[in-house]
Image: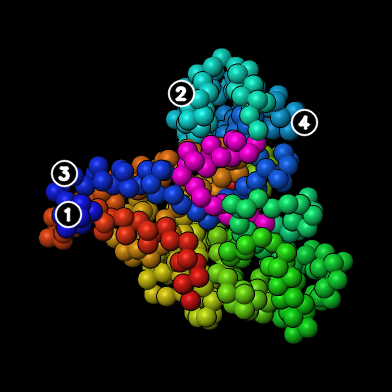
C-alpha cells in the first residue's frame, strides 16, 4: 500500500490538509475576477500599490470614516489618492487595519517583499517601476496558486470592447461574458445593438428580436477568448421568472436559449443594490436580501440550462444551497464582495459541506487588482484547510478510513474546472 493510501491517524489530518491546500500543491482556476492580463494595457490590467490602495474595499473604509469628500478624492491623480489613503489608513491610522480590504494590502506587500510598515510609498512604487507587468502577474499567480483567471467581459463598455476586438489576448485568461447591461437595461442596450447591426425592437419576447439578441450573444461568444459562462447580477427583488417583466422575457426568450445552445452555464448573482452612494463609484453599492422564489421558478423552467448562483446577502447562502440540493442543474459558487469575510466564508463553507457534500464551487476571488489574488486565495486556503480538516476528523471519528489520497481526490473534485461542462 502506498503512503497516500495509508490510513491517517486523527492528529495527522490537519497537517495533511495544510499541505494539500497549499498554493504550490492545489493550483486552481479562479472563476470570477475582474482582471485582464498585461496585454490589455495599464488602464484595463490593474496592478500596483496605488491600484491596491484605491480598490473599492479600501476606498469604502476611507470614505465611510469621513476622511475625505469622495467628489474631491475623485479629482486627484491615482498617486495622490494612494498617498492619502496610505497616510490615513496605514501610516497614521486611528486603529490597526483589521478589515479585510486593508489587511489584503499588507498581505500582498509582505508576500511581494515590500515593507507593509513603511512610512511612505516610495520603495513600493520603485518596485513597480522596476518590475515588468508580466513578472508581477507571474508572481501574483504563483503566490496565490492560480493557474487560469476568468474575467468579467462587458462588451457594452467601449474601452473593453475595443480591446476584445483589436487587442492580443493573454493565454491564461478566460472570459466571463457579463450580461447585466443587456438583461437589466434592455432599452439602453437595444439602442447599441441596433447601432451594431442587430435589428432588435423594444420587446425581447417578440420572435425576430429574440433571434437577433441570440445572434448577438453567439457572435460575441466567438469573438471573446474562451468563454466559460454568461453572468448577470440582479437587484434583490428582480422577477427573473416573470415573463411579463423585461428581465424575465429576455432571459427566457434570448439569453437562456443562447447559453443552452452554446453549452454555457448561467452565473446568477442576486443581491446588489447599485449606486447607493454615486460619488463613491464602485465602493457605493449596497446589498439587499433577495427573494429566492423567482430563482426556484427559473431553474425549474429551464431544466436543460446549467446555473451557478452566488447571492450577495449572506442570509441567502442557505437558500442557494437548498436550491442546489433540489435541482441537478444548479450549483452554489464562491463568496463574493460583502460575503468575503473570513467568519462568513467559514460559516458558509461548513454549511455547504454539511448540506451538499461536494456540490458547490468553493471560492472565486472577485479580484479587481492582480495583487488581490494573494490575500484572498491565501485566506480561503487557510479556512478550507481548517474546515475540511475538522470535517475529516469528524468522518474519522465516525469510522471512515481517511487517507491522503482521499483528501486529494476531494480537493480535485471541488476545484475541477470541468464541472462547468459536466453540469447539464
Ligand atoms: O465585488 C466587486 O468588485 C463588485 O464591485 C462587483 O463588481 C461584483 O463583483 C460584480 O461582479 O458585480
Ligand atoms: Zn465581481
Q: Secondary structure at mark 4?
A: helix
The circle drawn on residue 6 is 1
Report the Cα–Cα distance between label 3 and label 2.
Answer: 35 Å
Question: In the image, is residue 93 above or below residue 411?
Answer: above
Q: Do tag 4 and tag 1 residues touch (Cβ < 8 Å)?
A: no
Report the Cα–Cα distance between label 1 and label 2.
Answer: 45 Å
Q: Secondary structure at mark 2?
A: loop
Sequence order check: which comes first, mark 1 or mark 2?
A: 1
Q: Between residues 320 and 356, which one lies in front from this camera angle?
A: 356
Q: Nearer the viewer, mark 4 or mark 3?
A: 3
Which residue has dot 2 on it? 96
Is residue 150 magenta-colored?
Answer: yes
Colouring mode (rainbow / by chain / secondary structure / one colour) = rainbow
Q: Secondary structure at mark 3?
A: helix
Numbered range of the magenta stretch: 133-153
Report the Cα–Cα distance between label 4 and label 3.
Answer: 56 Å
Does 255 sit left or right of 298 as displayed? Answer: right
Amino acid at each position: 500500500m502506498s503512503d497516500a493510501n495509508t490510513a491517517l491517524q486523527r492528529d495527522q489530518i490537519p497537517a495533511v490538509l495544510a499541505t494539500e491546500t497549499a498554493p504550490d500543491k492545489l493550483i486552481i482556476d479562479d472563476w470570477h475576477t475582474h482582471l485582464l492580463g498585461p496585454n490589455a494595457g495599464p488602464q484595463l490590467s490593474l496592478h500596483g500599490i496605488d491600484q491596491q490602495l484605491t480598490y473599492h474595499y479600501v476606498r469604502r473604509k476611507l470614505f465611510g470614516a469621513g476622511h475625505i469628500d469622495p467628489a474631491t478624492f475623485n479629482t486627484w491623480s491615482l498617486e495622490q489618492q494612494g498617498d492619502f489613503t496610505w497616510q490615513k489608513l496605514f501610516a497614521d491610522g486611528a486603529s490597526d487595519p483589521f478589515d479585510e480590504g486593508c489587511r489584503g494590502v499588507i498581505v500582498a506587500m509582505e508576500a511581494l517583499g515590500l515593507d507593509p510598515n513603511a512610512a511612505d510609498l516610495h520603495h513600493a512604487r520603485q518596485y513597480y517601476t522596476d518590475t515588468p507587468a508580466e513578472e508581477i502577474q507571474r508572481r501574483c499567480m504563483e503566490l496565490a496558486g492560480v493557474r487560469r483567471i476568468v474575467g468579467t467581459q462587458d462588451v457594452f463598455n467601449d474601452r473593453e470592447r475595443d480591446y476584445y476586438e483589436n487587442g492580443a489576448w493573454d493565454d491564461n485568461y478566460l472570459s466571463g461574458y457579463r450580461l447585466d447591461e443587456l438583461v437589466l437595461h434592455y432599452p439602453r442596450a437595444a439602442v447599441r445593438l441596433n447601432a451594431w447591426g442587430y435589428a432588435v425592437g423594444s420587446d425581447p419576447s417578440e420572435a425576430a428580436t429574440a433571434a437577433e439578441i441570440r445572434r448577438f450573444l453567439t457572435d460575441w461568444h466567438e469573438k471573446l477568448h474562451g468563454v466559460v459562462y454568461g453572468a448577470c447580477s440582479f437587484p434583490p427583488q428582480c422577477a427573473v421568472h416573470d415573463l411579463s417583466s423585461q428581465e424575465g422575457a429576455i432571459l427566457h426568450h434570448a439569453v437562456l436559449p443562447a447559453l443552452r445552445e452554446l453549452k454555457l452555464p448561467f452565473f446568477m448573482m442576486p443581491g446588489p443594490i447599485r449606486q447607493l452612494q454615486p460619488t463613491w463609484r464602485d465602493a457605493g453599492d449596497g446589498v439587499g436580501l433577495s427573494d429566492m422564489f423567482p430563482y426556484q421558478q427559473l431553474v425549474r423552467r429551464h431544466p436543460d440550462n446549467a446555473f451557478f448562483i452566488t447571492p450577495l446577502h449572506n442570509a441567502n447562502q442557505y437558500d442557494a444551497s437548498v436550491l442546489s440540493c433540489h435541482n441537478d442543474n444548479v450549483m452554489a459558487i464562491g463568496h463574493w464582495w460583502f460575503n468575503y469575510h473570513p467568519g462568513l466564508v467559514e460559516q458558509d463553507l461548513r454549511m455547504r459541506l454539511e448540506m451538499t457534500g461536494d456540490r458547490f464551487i468553493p471560492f472565486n476571488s472577485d479580484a479587481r487588482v492582480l495583487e488581490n489574488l494573494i490575500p484572498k486565495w491565501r485566506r480561503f486556503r487557510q479556512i478550507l484547510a481548517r474546515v475540511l480538516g475538522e470535517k475529516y476528523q469528524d468522518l474519522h471519528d465516525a469510522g471512515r478510513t481517511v487517507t491522503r489520497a482521499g483528501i486529494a481526490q476531494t480537493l480535485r473534485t471541488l476545484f475541477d474546472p470541468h464541472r462547468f461542462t459536466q453540469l447539464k
